[in-house]
Image (tube, rainbow, N blue to C red):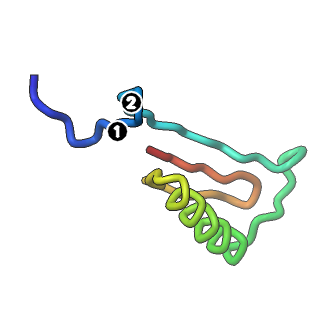
């Protein structure tokens, strides 16, 4: 069994987690413009960096945002 570079370790655990998050506006109203999505991506990347996580993919439309986090 080879060593996987993507496996993370904690003090008492070993893990590999991929999370797909979707944030949706209430009643699916169209509120996000390109500038909102750009700023939201900057914020999410900073938050992931603080938590030592990796934001693999970020995209969204005018009524929802998708995040893929490792």
Residue 65: x percent and y percent?
66, 53
Quadrant placement of the N terminus: top left
Residue sitting farthest toward the front:
11
Q: Secondary structure at mark 2?
A: strand
Give the percent coordinates (x, y) of residue 69. 49, 46
Nearer the observer, 39 or 26: 39
Residue nearer the viewer, 30 or 37: 37
Q: CA distance from mark 1 to mark 2?
A: 5 Å
- In the image, 50: left or right of 27? left
Q: For numbered disc 1, what is the local secondary structure?
A: strand
Residue annotated with mark 2: 15
Question: Is 35 located above or below residue 62 in the figure?
Answer: below
Label 2 crowding class (10 Å Cα cut-off): few <14, some 14-19, many 20+?
A: few
| Total tally of numbered discs in the picture | 2
| Residue at image coords 54%, 53% | 51
Report which residue position mark 1 lands on: 8
Q: Quadrant of the C terminus?
A: top left
Which quarter of the figure has residue 33? bottom right
Residue 28: percent from the left, percent from the top?
A: 83, 47
Residue that lies at the very extreme toward the bottom in this rendered image? 35
Q: Quadrant of residue 38?
A: bottom right
Q: Tags 1 and 2 in contact by the CB under 8 Å rule?
A: yes
The 10 Å Cα crowd at callout 1, few under 14, some 14 to 19, many 20 or more, is few
| Among the two numbered marks 1 and 2 on one chain, the one whose residue lies closer to the N terminus | 1
Residue furthest out toward the top:
1
**24 in relation to 31, above or below:** above
Q: Residue at x 60, y 60 (%)?
A: 47
Query: Which residue appears at 54% of the width and 63% of the height?
Result: 45
Looking at the image, which residue is at 67% across and 58% down? 61
Placement of 14 over or under 36, stated as above or below: above
């Amino acid at each position: 069994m080879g060593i996987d570079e993507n496996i993370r370790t904690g003090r008492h655990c070993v893990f590999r987690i991929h999370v797909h998050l979707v944030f949706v506006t209430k009643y699916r109203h169209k509120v996000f413009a390109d500038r909102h999505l750009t700023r939201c991506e900057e914020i999410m990347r900073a938050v992931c960096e603080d938590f030592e996580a990796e934001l693999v993919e970020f995209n969204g439309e005018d009524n929802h945002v998708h995040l893929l986090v490792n």
